[in-house]
């Protein structure tokens, strides 16, 4: 949602850049439609089971490669044994434009070829604990897009899941990119502000987050 006072682009840590209101309402609507489609299959959205028991409070569906703790596969052996949906070309293009918006280097962005996206849906109670994205074999940046309810996004450090960290708000349409020295920061979502979404995105409740990554895998 557009803020009354525009929120500036901010480098929260070296290589970790927040670009508020990057997606137009139309783009958010299109992404919601695409995510709704992926959520139905071939591998439906689900609460990921954790190896030591329990399930994640967010619901996740993947495209390109299927993520489960702590690996990527083409086949979703932990869900229904089907191959995940292909990573679409338009999303590669979106990832490149996101990188250019965050870092201002169109030439470097042209080499960025994300091949997986994790799509997380948060209801008002869902959270994500502090973690690093380190199951990829590539250190290329992670591109994160948020739609729906505003959340608190905790941007930590690369050493520990505790302080020092910076809490920012990710609202609908916001882009956040973490790469370079911040590629392996601990990060998490301690709180979703329920009911803050603009229904015009097509998402009437909850928060959708899409993270594009480069797995570095082939096959
Ligand atoms: C993630 O870390 O995979 C998701 C982050 C978010 O929901 O903003
Ligand atoms: Mn993550």
Image (cartoon, rainbow, N blue to C red):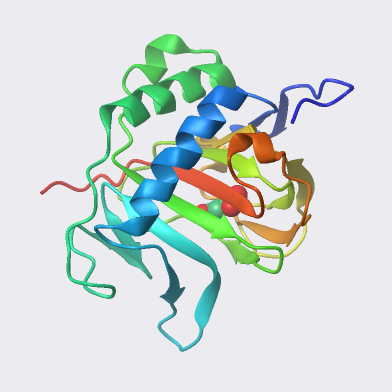
Picture coordinates of residue 131 (x, y %)?
56, 62
Picture coordinates of residue 214 (x, y %)?
33, 41
Picture coordinates of residue 3 (x, y %)?
83, 26
Residue at the extreme bottom of the image, as rendered:
53
Q: Is residue 52 found left or right of 70 in the rendered image? A: right
Q: Residue at x 65, y 67 (%)?
A: 126
Q: Which residue is drawn at 70% across and 69% down?
A: 125
Q: How many numbered circles does the render carry?
A: 0
Picture coordinates of residue 163 (x, y %)?
77, 60
Residue 145 appears in view: yes
Residue at the extreme left of the image, as rendered:
219
Q: Residue at x 46, y 89 (%)?
A: 53
Residue at the extreme right of the image, as rendered:
5
Q: Is residue 66 found left or right of 26 in the rendered image? A: left
Foreground residue among 87 and 111: 87
Foreground residue among 128 and 105: 128
Tell me: residue 175, above or below residue 211: above
Residue 172 appears in view: no
Tell me the quadrant of the picture where the N terminus can be found: top right
Tell me: residue 43, above or below residue 48: above
Foreground residue among 94 and 208: 208
Q: Residue at x 50, y 17 (%)?
A: 100
């Amino acid at each position: 949602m557009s803020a009354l006072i525009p929120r500036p682009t901010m480098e929260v840590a070296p290589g970790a850049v927040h670009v508020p209101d990057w997606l137009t309402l139309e783009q958010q609507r299109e992404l919601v439609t695409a995510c709704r489609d992926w959520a139905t299959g071939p591998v439906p959205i689900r609460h990921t089971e954790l190896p030591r028991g329990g399930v994640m409070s967010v619901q996740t569906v993947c495209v390109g490669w299927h993520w489960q703790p702590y690996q990527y596969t083409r086949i979703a052996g932990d869900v229904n044994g089907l191959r995940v949906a292909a990573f679409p070309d338009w999303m590669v293009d979106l990832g490149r434009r996101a990188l250019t918006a965050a870092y201002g280097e169109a030439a470097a962005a042209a080499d960025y070829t994300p091949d997986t996206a994790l799509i997380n849906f948060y209801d008002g109670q869902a959270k994500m604990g502090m973690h690093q994205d380190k199951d990829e074999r590539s250190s290329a940046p992670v591109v994160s897009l948020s739609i729906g309810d505003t959340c608190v996004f905790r941007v930590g450090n690369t050493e520990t899941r505790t302080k020092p960290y910076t809490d920012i708000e990710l609202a609908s349409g916001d882009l956040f990119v973490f790469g370079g020295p911040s590629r392996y920061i601990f990060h998490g979502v301690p709180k979703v502000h329920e009911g803050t979404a603009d229904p015009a995105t097509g998402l009437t409740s909850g928060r959708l987050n899409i993270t594009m990554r480069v797995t570095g895998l082939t096959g």
